[in-house]
Image (tube, grey):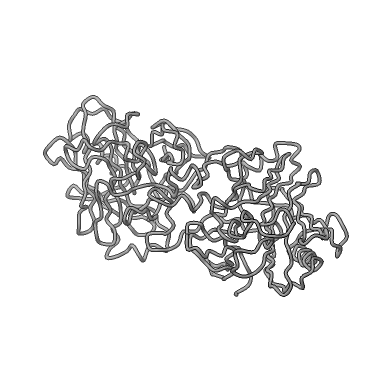
């Protein structure tokens, strides 16, 4: 299965927070619109994928300290929101294409709370189209750490900022997600959300997973985006303009793979290679 | 990605008459029909060495097949420059059905059916597809001479009598992606990686990995995941190294579900025959599927 390229604009930008929610919302909106999202009433709608799907997202000032991010279907809203805290003087990074986005506080500190949100509509293989196009063509996900405006219980270690498939510290699945899928919303702060097909605990002992070729070249893998049923991950498509590599990299570094430049989204420090590093295409 | 050999696929059965010469001749006919070439020995004799076609990456491999007068027919992985000391044996059993399968790069011969407890009943060998960067790596050593291959079976002694480590359920016939699969030889560069207890499996993760952070085996709609048949052995030439991937099988894939041995399924526009008999319903151990031109 190949990587899925959006063939659209990729927006990468950083900004220094002035500590206001309005700035976060403005920066996020501008980036997504520049990447090809549109919409009204404060809800931005992704481009329609070649498979015919799209998703809505909303960032709003809900009144307290954080910006609230919500996933929206045609007629329903997500049942789990995610929150991003503006911190004055700190650098934030936004990445977006016409189908997906990431916004997070830049840097290598994974102990931050309410510091990242990801979302989008996946690429899907053709055989999933009929199954997912019920009752409409809204299908997507949102992922983050902070589940409330004041949530300090969860850090970026539980998110894609730390690993594709498993927390660095606790040994559990990467989690915190909400989906719009087949006319329903399924989400929770501990909803399993992981990228790829191989978990880190598969890399040792009798459950060994393979991370290298014979010449010690690291494996690249398709970024399967997994939907959890009873905490068991099931591939529901692929991230766009992304890949997974079985090697540790510092967060936000850039390098060439093949003819493309990639930005490291995860900050992998624990040498649990099997948990994978997530890379986004970088302009 | 599945590398297709774009060659003739031979997939057929024969009934053993209980003799070793018959088995040697069946093997020889199989390889001739699939496009292999005799390089040592006399056609029709019981000590013959055949060489595969050259892959697009410019690798090939040789196998020697001998009737040594022991209970089994002996197979050895070879290049013109080195011969593995590791061998695999097949023991003919009168009136039993055997299946042979080959393309121009790889072959297998095994006792047909769903019996996963018969020793000396399967051998699988060939030259793998390798990605370009790995081809450069294997060719970088001048002692490599363009020969690259593997041999897998469930009898390395030919002495008769089962040993638990050699039974079919510890081969690709029993579980293609199970970490307990063993008994491989791999030849590359200037070494042969050989061990009777060598662990190696197909795919990117063994079935034991399934669990809390395991490996998804189905798409969200219940469709079973298909996977590349990646060939894994200890990295480099040291048996103590962690496993690494050394290429892919040709005309093959893994299906993350259980099938009975030798059933044929249409996947995409191709027919595939289940090589693995996945009787234990641990789907994560995966079924090896080989391209076939036979409808049943």
Question: Residue at image x 68%, y 68%?
Answer: B99
Asked whether B208 or A253 is in front, the reply is B208
Residue B24 spot, x, y in % from top left: 79, 64
**Residue A66 picture quarter:** top left
Seen at 27% across and 65% down, the residue is A135
**A165 horizontally vs B206: left or right:** left
Give the answer, above or below, for where B110 lies relative to B85.
below
> Which one is in front, B42 or A204?
A204
Residue B64 sits in quarter: bottom right
Furthest residue toward left: A63
Determine the residue located farthest toward the top in the rendered image.
A89
- Quadrant occupied by the C terminus of chain A: top left
User: Does A263 sit above or below residue B228?
Assistant: above
Residue at image coords 56%, 51%: B180
Q: Is residue B2 above or below residue A113?
A: below
x, y percentage for residue B52? 75, 55
Depth check: give the residue in front, B115 or B273.
Answer: B115
Q: How many marks?
A: 0
Position of residue A189 measured from the top left corner of the image (x, y, whole percent): 24, 46
- Could you tell me residue A109's position as x and y percent? 32, 29
Residue for point 41% across, 35% down: A264
Give whichever of B173, B6 is nearer the camera: B173
Q: Decide if residue A45 is on the left or right side of residue B223.
A: left
Residue B123 position by quadrant:
bottom right
């Amino acid at each position: 299965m190949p990587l899925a390229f959006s063939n659209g604009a990729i927006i990468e930008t950083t900004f220094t927070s002035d500590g206001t929610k309005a700035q976060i919302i403005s920066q996020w909106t501008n980036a997504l619109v520049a990447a090809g999202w549109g919409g009204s009433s404060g809800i931005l709608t992704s481009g329609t994928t070649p498979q015919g799907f799209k998703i809505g997202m909303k960032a709003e000032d809900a009144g307290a300290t954080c910006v609230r991010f919500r996933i929206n279907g045609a007629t329903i809203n997500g049942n789990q929101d995610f929150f991003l805290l503006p911190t004055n003087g700190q650098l934030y990074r936004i990445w977006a294409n016409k189908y997906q986005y990431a916004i997070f506080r830049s840097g290598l500190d994974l102990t931050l709370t309410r510091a990242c949100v990801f979302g989008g509509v996946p690429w899907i293989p053709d055989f999933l189209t009929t199954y997912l196009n019920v009752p409409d063509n809204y299908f997507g996900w949102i992922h983050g750490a902070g589940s409330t405006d004041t949530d300090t219980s969860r850090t970026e270690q539980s998110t894609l900022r730390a690993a594709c498939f498993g927390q660095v510290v606790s040994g559990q699945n990467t989690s915190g997600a909400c989906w719009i899928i087949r006319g329903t919303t399924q989400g929770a702060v501990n909803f399993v959300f992981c990228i790829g097909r191989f978990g880190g605990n598969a890399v040792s002992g009798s459950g060994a997973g393979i991370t290298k070729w014979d010449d010690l070249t690291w494996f690249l893998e398709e970024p399967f985006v997994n939907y959890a049923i009873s905490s068991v991950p099931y591939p529901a498509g692929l991230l766009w303009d992304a890949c997974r590599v079985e090697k540790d990299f510092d967060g936000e570094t850039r390098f060439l793979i093949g003819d493309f430049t990639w930005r490291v989204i995860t900050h992998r420090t624990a040498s649990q290679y099997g948990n994978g590093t997530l890379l986004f295409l970088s302009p | 990605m599945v590398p297709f050999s774009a060659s003739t696929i031979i997939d057929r059965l024969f009934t053993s008459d209980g003799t070793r010469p018959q088995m040697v001749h069946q093997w020889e006919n199989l390889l001739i029909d699939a496009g292999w070439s005799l390089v040592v020995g006399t056609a029709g004799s019981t000590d013959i060495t055949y060489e595969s076609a050259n892959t697009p990456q410019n690798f090939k491999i040789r196998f020697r097949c001998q009737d040594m007068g022991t209970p089994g027919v002996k197979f050895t992985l070879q290049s013109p420059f080195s011969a593995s000391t590791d061998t695999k044996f097949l023991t003919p059993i009168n009136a039993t059905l055997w299946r042979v399968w080959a393309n121009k790069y790889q072959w297998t011969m095994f006792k047909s059916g769903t019996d996963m407890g018969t020793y000396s009943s399967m051998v699988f060998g060939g030259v793998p597809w390798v990605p370009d960067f790995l081809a450069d790596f294997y060719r970088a050593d001048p002692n490599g001479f363009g020969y690259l291959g593997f041999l897998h079976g469930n009898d390395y002694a030919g002495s008769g009598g089962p040993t638990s480590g050699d039974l079919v359920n510890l081969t690709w016939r029993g579980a293609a992606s199970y970490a307990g699969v063993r008994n491989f030889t791999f030849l590359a560069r200037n070494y042969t990686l050989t061990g009777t207890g060598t662990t190696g499996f197909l795919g990117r993760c063994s079935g034991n990995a399934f669990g809390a952070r395991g490996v998804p085996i189905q798409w969200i709609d219940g469709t079973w995941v298909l996977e590349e048949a990646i060939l894994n052995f200890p990295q480099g030439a040291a048996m103590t190294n962690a496993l690494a991937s050394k290429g892919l099988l040709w005309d093959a894939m893994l299906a993350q579900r259980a099938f009975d041995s030798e059933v044929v399924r249409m996947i995409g526009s191709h027919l595939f025959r289940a090589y693995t008999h996945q009787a234990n319903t641990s789907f994560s151990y995966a079924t090896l599927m080989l391209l076939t031109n036979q409808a049943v």
